Image (cartoon, rainbow, N blue to C red):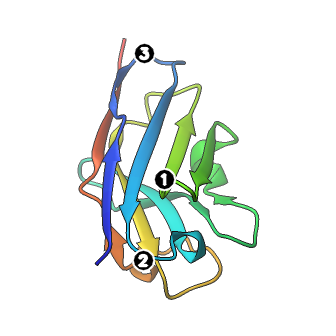
Amino acid sequence: QVQLVESGGGLVQPGGSLRLSCAASGRNFINWIMGWFRQAPGKEREFVAADSRYYRPTYNEDAVKGRFTISRDNAKNMVYLQMTSLEPKDPAVYYCAATRQRSTTSPSVQEYDYWGQGTQVTVSS
């Protein structure tokens, strides 16, 4: 049984930073592909970043432009999304996602089998 629980969302001013966390339960976490997605009201869920064991992380560069960093702590079954220089276009519910069926990252929502409940990020002055 895989469970994902996000935390760390909140209200931040434009230009500010937040770090989202995702706690995962399940075996062999080190082999999982972990992703972050976001969904703003009225929009489709959008890929943000993903991480794998053997390859460099991948990002939606159009969306994050080097401002976000995904990382993981395999000893703690945790994955993080460090967000800096937050902009008015960034507010959304941010979701942690996982798949055990791949060895490489994917930007496709359909490739991920497990999802957290989401955490809200609001950017406002």
Q: Mark 3 belongs to which amino acid?
A: Gln
Q: Secondary structure at mark 3?
A: loop
Q: In the depicted view, which residue is nearer to us: 55 or 78?
A: 78
Residue displayed at 34% across by 34% down: 9
Q: Earlier in the sequence, mark 2 or mark 3?
A: 3
Q: CA distance from mark 2 to mark 3?
A: 31 Å
Q: In the depicted view, which residue is nearer to us: 61 or 80?
A: 80
Residue displayed at 76% across by 63% down: 56
Q: From the top left corner, tell me how far across and down residue 11 is, in percent.
A: 32, 22
Q: Mark 1 belongs to which amino acid?
A: Met
Q: CA distance from mark 2 to mark 1?
A: 17 Å
Residue annotated with mark 2: 112
Q: Is residue 54 left or right of residue 34?
A: right
Q: Are marks 2 and 1 in contact (CB under 8 Å)?
A: no
Q: Earlier in the sequence, mark 2 or mark 1?
A: 1
Q: Earlier in the sequence, mark 3 or mark 1?
A: 3
Q: From the top left corner, tell me how far across and down residue 60 is, in percent.
A: 60, 56
Q: Which mark is residue 34?
A: none
Picture quadrant of residue 117: bottom left
Q: From the top left corner, tell me how far across and down residue 15 is, in percent.
A: 54, 18
Q: Are marks 2 and 3 in contact (CB under 8 Å)?
A: no
Q: Quadrant of the C terminus?
A: top left
Residue annotated with mark 3: 13
Q: From the top left corner, tell me how far across and down residue 108 is, in percent.
A: 49, 75
